[in-house]
Image (cartoon, helix red, strand yellow):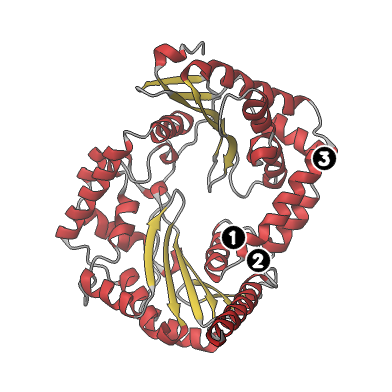
């Protein structure tokens, strides 16, 4: 009995500890006291001290991506990012992995449509070793030929496996048609052919051209004092010298509106539908009104118009969503759904009906208030951990959204009116000129479009 009471007491104390721990993570999420510094070498440093846990999260953005690749070498930025931790001037890939694992940290690099991201998660007590490895892979990668070959084979294998995924096929065709020759129309990973064409010389030049302090943003969040960060930066990034960046590659964006239907044959029972067109860049001031509009149309899960009509009323799809994905340059608006092959025409028709409807009439008071409540209420979840805050700070700096963006977002969403929703829907949604990509058993789907 005594041991049982002791066990229960331990459970109670554990739950109390867990509650306190979680509360410490979520409280004061908007108290982002951020210090911004631009160093002599051009490196932008953002720091927010958070002493609730003995951990430090580091995010570095390198301002280069597929936008700086040639069409023939597509996948170069992605491959370069994946090879950063595969060997440096003083360490083999295995040594880097062993040292990271030994201190229980994580070190990752990835490439997106607009930038490359390198992240470090490390305990405060191991911050010295963490910064040593973090800076080493950014400043001193050597890109061994055997690792290049291995990564190439892995990426090619992954791309071949994706060919079996209807969503991948629809997305690739959709982006290619919407963006045309613009790099956003290509896969970040490149293609089997373009990956094969990338050489070690290409990777070394890409790294030396773009991995520069005057082309980077460093965000550090966690249990680290300003003076300690200054010491680490001086020790590990002092030799990083700024250089002239290559002239910015010009990537013309399609200007003409198009209507294009892409039918991809696949032996499936469910048709995958993707419908949409070009939309706004991330820094467009209409971003907030579009966020509210999209939530009402198809971004709001079970409460969205598309979900209620196509799923709840008609029972034609388990899931249907709309998105607009703004980027540094223009992004895309799209609606995605899966339905039986035989229902594809009806679902496309209902998507277009809902787009026309939200362009014609004002949304209701309830729809507007529900959208605002969700968007403002869910915003703190984007900042509930130090990892998310570090990434968030780097992102808002990259897109020039302003140091007060965390507060501005809430007030901007709350300021959206029904007239704003109607205006942006009329300005940015198009039910006549769009790209429709459908992966299906085309005989059963019998698309009329």
Q: Secondary structure at mark 3?
A: helix
Say if mark 3 contacts mark 1, CB within 8 Å: no
Disc 1/disc 2 C-alpha distance (Å) = 7 Å
Q: Earlier in the sequence, mark 3 or mark 1?
A: 3
Badge nearest the viewer, 3 or 1: 3
- Residue holding disc 2: 403
Q: Earlier in the sequence, mark 2 or mark 3?
A: 3
* Front residue of this view, candidates 97 and 285: 97
- Please state the horizontal and vertical placement of residue 299, each as a whole percent of the image: 64, 40
Determine the residue located farthest toward the right in the rendered image: 365
Say if mark 2 contacts mark 3, CB within 8 Å: no
- Please state the horizontal and vertical placement of residue 271, each as a whole percent of the image: 46, 24
- Residue holding disc 3: 366
Q: Residues within 10 Å of mark 1 (few under 14, many from 20)?
A: some
* Mark linked to residue 436: none
Which image quadrant is residue 63 in?
bottom left
Point 38% across, 24% down: residue? 268
Q: Residues within 10 Å of mark 3 (few under 14, many from 20)?
A: few
Which image quadrant is residue 17 in?
bottom right
Say if mark 1 contacts mark 2, CB within 8 Å: yes
Point 67% across, 21% down: residue? 353
The correct choice, above or below, for 154 with respect to 242 in the image is: above
- Please state the horizontal and vertical placement of residue 342, each as a whole percent of the image: 49, 15
- Residue holding disc 1: 396
């Amino acid at each position: 009995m005594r041991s049982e009471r002791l066990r229960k007491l331990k459970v109670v104390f554990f739950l109390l500890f867990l509650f306190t721990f979680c509360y410490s993570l979520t409280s004061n999420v908007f108290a982002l006291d951020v210090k911004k510094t631009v160093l002599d070498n051009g490196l932008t440093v953002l720091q927010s001290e958070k002493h609730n846990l003995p951990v430090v999260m580091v995010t570095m953005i390198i301002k280069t991506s597929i936008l700086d690749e040639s069409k023939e070498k597509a996948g170069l930025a992605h491959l370069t990012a994946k090879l950063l931790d595969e060997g440096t001037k003083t360490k083999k890939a295995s040594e880097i992995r062993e040292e990271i694992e030994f201190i229980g940290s994580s070190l990752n690099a990835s490439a997106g449509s607009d930038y490359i991201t390198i992240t470090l998660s490390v305990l405060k007590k191991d911050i010295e070793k963490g910064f040593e490895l973090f800076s080493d892979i950014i400043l001193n990668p050597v890109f061994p030929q055997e690792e290049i070959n291995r990564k190439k084979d892995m990426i090619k294998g992954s791309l071949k496996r994706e060919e079996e995924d209807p969503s991948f096929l629809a997305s690739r065709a959709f982006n290619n048609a919407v963006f045309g020759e613009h790099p956003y129309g290509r896969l970040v990973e490149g293609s089997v052919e373009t990956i094969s064409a990338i050489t070690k010389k290409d990777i070394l030049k890409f790294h030396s051209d773009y991995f520069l302090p005057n082309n980077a943003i460093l965000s550090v969040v966690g249990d680290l004092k300003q003076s300690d960060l200054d010491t680490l930066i001086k020790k590990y990034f002092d030799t990083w010298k700024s250089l002239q960046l290559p002239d910015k590659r010009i990537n013309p964006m399609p200007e003409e509106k198009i209507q294009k239907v892409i039918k991809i044959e696949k032996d499936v029972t469910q048709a995958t539908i993707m419908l949409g067109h070009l939309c706004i860049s991330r820094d467009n001031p209409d971003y907030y009104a579009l966020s509210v509009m999209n939530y009402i149309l198809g971004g709001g899960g079970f409460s969205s118009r598309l979900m209620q009509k196509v799923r709840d009323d008609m029972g034609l799809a388990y899931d249907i969503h709309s998105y607009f994905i703004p980027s540094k340059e223009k992004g895309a608006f799209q609606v995605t759904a899966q339905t039986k092959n035989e229902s594809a025409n009806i679902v496309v028709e209902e998507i277009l009906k809902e787009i026309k409807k939200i362009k014609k009439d004002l949304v209701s008071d309830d729809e507007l208030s529900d959208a605002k409540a969700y968007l403002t209420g869910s915003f703190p979840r984007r900042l509930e951990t130090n990892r998310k805050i570090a990434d968030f700070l780097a992102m808002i700096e990259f897109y020039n959204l302003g140091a007060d963006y965390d507060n501005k977002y809430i007030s901007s969403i709350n300021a959206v009116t029904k007239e704003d929703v109607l205006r942006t829907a009329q300005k940015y949604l198009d039910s006549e000129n769009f790209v429709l990509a459908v992966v299906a058993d085309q005989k059963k789907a019998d698309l009329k479009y």
